[in-house]
């Protein structure tokens, strides 16, 4: 269920026929009936099957790799180790698909050479006639390891005597924010509260594991059809293999979920190497067990918050340190740390601010992008601290939030002025109200309500100079086509472009054909990451569709002897607004315009706002295009005897700017409710000295269909965003407050705070037992 | 990766017994444990005898003398059977939260018992029903109390030539309560951290019969007989229940694993025995 609240303040007289409506998505029928083709569904004649030898050690020298028995096995066509690769043996893992970027040490070996640095690091690749044969070949490869001392903790890794994982030291990235006068801020406070909060590894757990087929075609083009969020990895593949960029063709069919786990390259370059070496098509669908080590999970973070607050709830100072475990390779850790740094103050204005953040290399799994990209962890810590502040000074926590919410026109953490609407208060009030009355405790259960707000960016970091291109055209029969390389990762990316185009050109969205996921036949739309796909590709598509519309209306104005502004397109017709009887079908209109040589298509580029980075001493500057705001509220019950937490109701209320497809917005909110619930309560990759202990879905506990609470979506529309029709990005933002709201609800129920996630029944019971001991019950 | 394995597919029960006697492998029922174990490598056998076509193992029969259930009965079958609600309320409760909806349609009671896992969720409630299992081979049929079926962690008295064909128990007495609680890290598809079932029969204001079974807190699911002995023939006061819960906890031999610590298992086993005894006593006393 959802309700819509639209402010009339931003765009008046908006008359939308399709956008924002509850329309079935264009990709639904093919998915519901099982016809949609995913990367692992493709088969080619003569195709080989690949397997990857993943290290079973977390930190060891490789003395030798003997592949002779594997090579001798009949039906094995290719066995590759680091020795057989191009000399650089490196793939770029910096922010993908861009010309900007360039952080320290973001090249990662394709295959481990003298050393393995994490459990699961690839050592050898095999292509054979079948998976069984490839597996047999893997088992015949003999690796002579010499175990070495590793480091498995982000704090230990920063000590001077810690083993260095790679490069000169274990500092992957560090930021500082210095704003206002921190000492003065604390001096003005009536209370000062210090707390440390830590969070765990979280696995993306997409339904579809990494999957791809690679082959070299008759034009010597290296083709890869892969489950990826980023078709522009073709550049990184080409660079890694020493090929020209225009000789690698990467395409993505429908993707069965990404959540950031398919943002950095996963298996593409391995398959490229095997296809080049064997000159046969090669396929790999990772097993679930191997998928756990084939992409980077969410960074574990530790935040220490010291906050000054007046007795009437005004925050006077915040001093925060943040530390993340980057694991054995940098990947996107520097950027994720930046997001966490900006997000450390939540949706609050803090004028006296001091932040130090560090990401450290360890011999744990390399961590990487995961929906929320550091902001989610930072926000979870901040919202716990806010709740504790309210408790300390005996104030309602929503009232305390209201005293401190950032507002339009205010500077945020890095001094960036917020220009879009900030409806934190409205969202929080609606979410909390929707929970209803709090239940009274029983002999066996305690009950609690929790709230969390957030500020999360959408769009990529400004100095990435992000752009997106899209092509919109009309066929002579009046049907519409969109060409944009956006990858459809299950969030309706393709369908939204059809809906936007249909709205502007007056044709039903399900009659718009979208060519997507292929950057060699379509204009480059950019990545489906950073909550930017709708914002950027939607905006480019909107611009292109408006060009086509303007061309047609100019021509038709002459036909109807009116000005173009007096015409509208809708319901497959062009008509005079004040005299709708004067109309022509879109089909006739396009035919008419075509006969006059009117340009019926347009290629447009949308350029996101840019800037040149932060001041290194103060951390001040503009980082993101814009931000989304909202709230999540949850009610829980807690079993007094077992510590089990049951989420009863979970409500997301978000200002999405403008919903493009209401069902998709609801889907994002509902999905985030469960993803955040898993993070709060049950999900945790367990590593022992870097070795993964629970890499399976029976031991790694994502919420199941039976764990779904009563979820309510409340959609607010300020129409103030940078995206098409004033929309804001919501893919990541809707997740940012979920875990915090559940954690706060548990604290409300049991009367004390657990500082490290997830809240397992065991931790909750220990807290309840400690409370009983303290109160002498 | 799922390894290759042989699966013979007998069409009749006698063919199954013949295959077992001939050493053609182990029985393969719903496969919801075997397939993951084969994939994960903890199952090393490569020869199995499918029970998929043996309809004779899939039935539930309620009679005056008690209930008999074929070992091929699926968990979903239990949930669909109207008679089970009164014949074995705790078994219905256990079935309702057994794994997830998909697994319930494939997993069988016989398979759940014979996997020998301490976390097998049907076993505690069957133990508190005082159930017996029927073991058949080509040569003989024997009926064994379920309580004597488990010898140790995944060790059964079942011989390689035998098949567990049926589970049976006498009706619950009027004025009894039969409860189950599964403590797990999530609601669906979860491996039990602590499982407790309790059966209390009340007659003339005293506890005429009591059975307590615990799962996931020892190498096998077991009956807490020392606790039972404290309660049988007594009026259950909260002090007595407290004592019994402690006695039950004393019989636990839990381990630490990724799901929970031994200490937590012990603490919750005691708390849940206390809770279920209290609830069962109240319920049985008022019916």
Image (cartoon, rainbow, N blue to C red):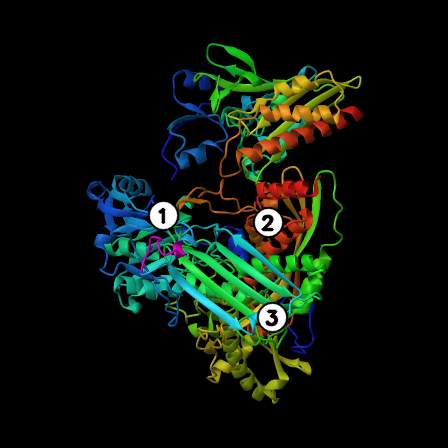
Tell me what residue is drawn at x 60 percent, y 63 percent: A307
How far apart are the two marked residues, 2 and 3, measured between alpha carbons?
A: 28 Å
Q: Is residue A420 or residue A470 the one in the foreground?
A: A420
What SS does tag 3 mark? helix
Q: Label 2 crowding class (10 Å Cα cut-off): few <14, some 14-19, many 20+?
A: some
Q: Which label is found at residue B95? A: none
Q: Position of residue B159 (x, y in %)?
A: 45, 16
Mark 1 or 3, which is nearer the eye?
3
Q: Is residue A516 magenta?
A: no
Residues rendered magenta in the picture: A157-167
Tell me what residue is drawn at x 22 percent, y 46 percent: A63
Q: Position of residue B37 (x, y in %)?
A: 43, 33
Q: Are marks 1 and 3 in contact (CB under 8 Å)?
A: no
Residue bearing the label numbered 3 = A185
Mark 2 or 3, which is nearer the eye?
3
Q: Is residue A164 magenta?
A: yes
- Residue A19 visible in rendering: no
* Residue at the limit of the structure toward the top, as seen here: B139
Give the prevailing secondary structure in the magenta stretch: loop
Residue B200's place in the image compared with A405, above or below, is above
What SS does tag 2 mark? loop
Left or right, A356 with respect to B280, comes to: left
Residue A308's place in the image compared with A759, above or below, is below
Residue bearing the label numbered 2 = A754
Residue A283's place in the image compared with A587, above or below, is above
């Amino acid at each position: 269920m959802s309700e819509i609240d639209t402010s009339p303040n931003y765009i008046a007289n908006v008359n939308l026929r399709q956008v924002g409506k509850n329309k079935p998505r264009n990709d639904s029928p093919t998915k519901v009936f099982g016809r949609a083709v995913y990367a692992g569904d493709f088969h080619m004649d003569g195709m080989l099957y690949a397997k990857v030898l993943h290290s079973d050690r977390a930190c060891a020298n490789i003395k030798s790799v003997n592949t002779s028995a594997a090579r001798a096995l009949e039906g094995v066509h290719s066995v590759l180790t680091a020795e057989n690769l191009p000399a650089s043996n490196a793939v770029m893992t910096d922010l993908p698909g861009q010309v900007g970027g360039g952080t320290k040490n973001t090249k990662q070996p394709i295959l481990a050479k003298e050393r393995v640095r994490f459990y699961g690091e690839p050592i050898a690749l095999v292509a054979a006639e079948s998976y069984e044969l490839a597996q047999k070949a893997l088992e015949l490869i003999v690796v002579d390891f010499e175990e070495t001392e590793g480091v498995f903790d982000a704090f230990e890794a920063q000590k001077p005597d810690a083993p260095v994982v790679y490069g000169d030291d274990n500092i992957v990235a560090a930021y500082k924010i210095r704003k206002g006068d921190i000492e003065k801020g604390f001096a003005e406070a009536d209370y000062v509260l210090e707390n440390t909060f830590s969070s765990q590894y979280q696995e993306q757990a997409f339904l579809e594991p990494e999957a791809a087929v690679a082959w070299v075609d008759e034009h010597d083009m290296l083709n890869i059809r892969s489950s990826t969020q980023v078709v522009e990895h073709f550049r990184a593949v080409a660079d890694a293999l020493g090929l020209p960029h225009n000789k690698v063709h990467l395409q993505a069919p429908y993707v069965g979920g990404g959540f950031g786990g398919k943002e950095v390259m996963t298996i593409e370059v391995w398959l490229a190497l095997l296809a080049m070496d064997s000159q046969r098509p090669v396929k790999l669908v990772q097993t679930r067990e191997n998928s756990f080590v084939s992409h980077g999970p969410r960074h574990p973070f530790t935040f220490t918050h010291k906050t000054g607050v007046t007795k009437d709830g005004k925050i006077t100072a915040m001093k925060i340190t943040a530390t993340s475990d980057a694991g054995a390779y940098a990947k996107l850790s520097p950027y994720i740390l930046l997001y966490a740094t900006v997000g450390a103050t939540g949706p609050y204005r803090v004028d006296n601010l001091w932040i130090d953040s560090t990401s450290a290399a360890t011999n744990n799994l390399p961590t990487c992008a995961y929906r929320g990209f550091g902001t989610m962890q930072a926000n979870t810590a901040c919202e716990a601290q806010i709740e504790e502040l309210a408790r300390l000074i005996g104030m309602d926590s929503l009232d305390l939030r209201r005293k401190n919410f950032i507002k339009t026109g205010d500077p945020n953490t890095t001094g960036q002025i917020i220009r879009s609407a900030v409806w934190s208060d409205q969202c929080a009030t609606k979410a909390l109200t929707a929970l209803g009355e709090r239940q009274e405790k029983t002999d066996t259960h305690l009950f609690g309500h929790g709230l969390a707000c957030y500020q999360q960016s959408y769009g990529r970091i400004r100095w990435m100079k992000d752009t997106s291109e899209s092509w919109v055209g009309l066929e002579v029969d009046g049907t519409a086509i969109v060409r944009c390389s956006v990858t459809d990762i299950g969030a309706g990316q393709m369908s939204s472009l059809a809906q936007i185009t249909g709205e502007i050109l007056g044709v039903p969205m399900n009659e718009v054909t979208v060519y997507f996921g292929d950057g060699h036949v379509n204009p480059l739309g950019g990545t489906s990451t950073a909550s930017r796909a709708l914002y950027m590709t939607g905006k480019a598509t909107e611009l292109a569709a408006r060009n086509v519309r303007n061309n047609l209306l100019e021509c038709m104005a002459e036909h109807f002897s009116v000005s173009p502004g007096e015409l509208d397109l809708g319901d497959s017709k062009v008509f005079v607004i004040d005299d709708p009887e004067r109309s022509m079908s879109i089909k006739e209109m396009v035919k008419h315009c075509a006969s006059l040589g009117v340009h019926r298509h347009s290629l447009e580029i949308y350029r996101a706002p840019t800037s040149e980075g932060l001041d290194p001493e103060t951390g001040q500057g503009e980082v993101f295009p814009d931000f989304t705001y909202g709230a999540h509220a949850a009610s829980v019950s807690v079993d007094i005897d077992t510590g089990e937490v049951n989420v009863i109701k979970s409500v997301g209320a978000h200002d999405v700017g403008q919903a493009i497809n209401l069902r998709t917005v609801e889907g994002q909110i509902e999905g985030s409710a469960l993803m955040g619930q898993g993070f709060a309560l049950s999900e945790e990759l367990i590593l022992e000295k870097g070795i993964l202990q629970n890499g399976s879905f029976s031991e790694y506990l994502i919420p199941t269909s039976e764990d779904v609470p009563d979820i309510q979506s409340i959609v607010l529309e300020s129409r103030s965003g940078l995206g098409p029709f004033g929309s804001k990005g919501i893919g990541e933002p809707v997740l940012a407050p979920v875990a915090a709201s559940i954690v706060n609800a548990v604290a409300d129920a049991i009367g004390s705070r657990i500082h490290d996630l997830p809240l397992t029944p065991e931790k909750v019971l220990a807290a309840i037992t400690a409370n009983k001991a303290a109160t002498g019950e | 990766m799922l390894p290759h394995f042989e699966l013979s597919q007998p069409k009749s029960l006698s063919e199954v017994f013949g295959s077992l006697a001939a050493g053609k492998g182990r029985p393969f029922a719903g496969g919801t444990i075997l397939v993951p174990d084969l994939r994960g490598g903890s199952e090393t056998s490569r020869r199995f005898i499918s029970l998929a076509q043996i309809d004779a193992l899939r039935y539930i029969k309620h009679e005056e003398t008690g209930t008999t259930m074929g070992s091929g009965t699926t968990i979903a079958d239990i949930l669909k059977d109207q008679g089970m609600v009164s014949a074995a309320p705790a078994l219905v409760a256990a079935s309702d939260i057994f794994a997830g909806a998909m697994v319930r349609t494939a997993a069988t009671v016989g398979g759940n018992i014979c996997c020998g896992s301490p976390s097998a969720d049907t076993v505690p409630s069957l133990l508190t029903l005082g159930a017996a299992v029927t073991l058949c081979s080509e040569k003989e049929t024997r009926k064994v109390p379920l309580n004597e079926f488990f010898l140790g962690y995944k060790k059964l008295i079942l011989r390689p030539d035998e098949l567990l064909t049926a589970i049976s128990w006498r009706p619950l007495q009027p004025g009894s309560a039969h409860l189950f609680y599964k403590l797990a890290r999530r609601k669906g598809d979860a491996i039990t951290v602590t499982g407790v079932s309790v059966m209390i029969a009340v007659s003339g204001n005293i506890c005429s019969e009591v059975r307590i079974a615990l799962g996931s807190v020892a190498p096998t699911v077991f009956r807490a007989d020392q606790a039972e002995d404290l309660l049988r023939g007594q009026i259950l006061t909260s002090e007595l229940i407290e004592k019994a819960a402690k006695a039950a906890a004393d019989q636990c031999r839990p381990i630490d694993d990724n799901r929970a610590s031994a200490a937590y298992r012990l603490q919750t086993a005691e708390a849940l025995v206390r809770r279920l005894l209290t609830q069962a006593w109240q319920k049985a006393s008022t019916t």
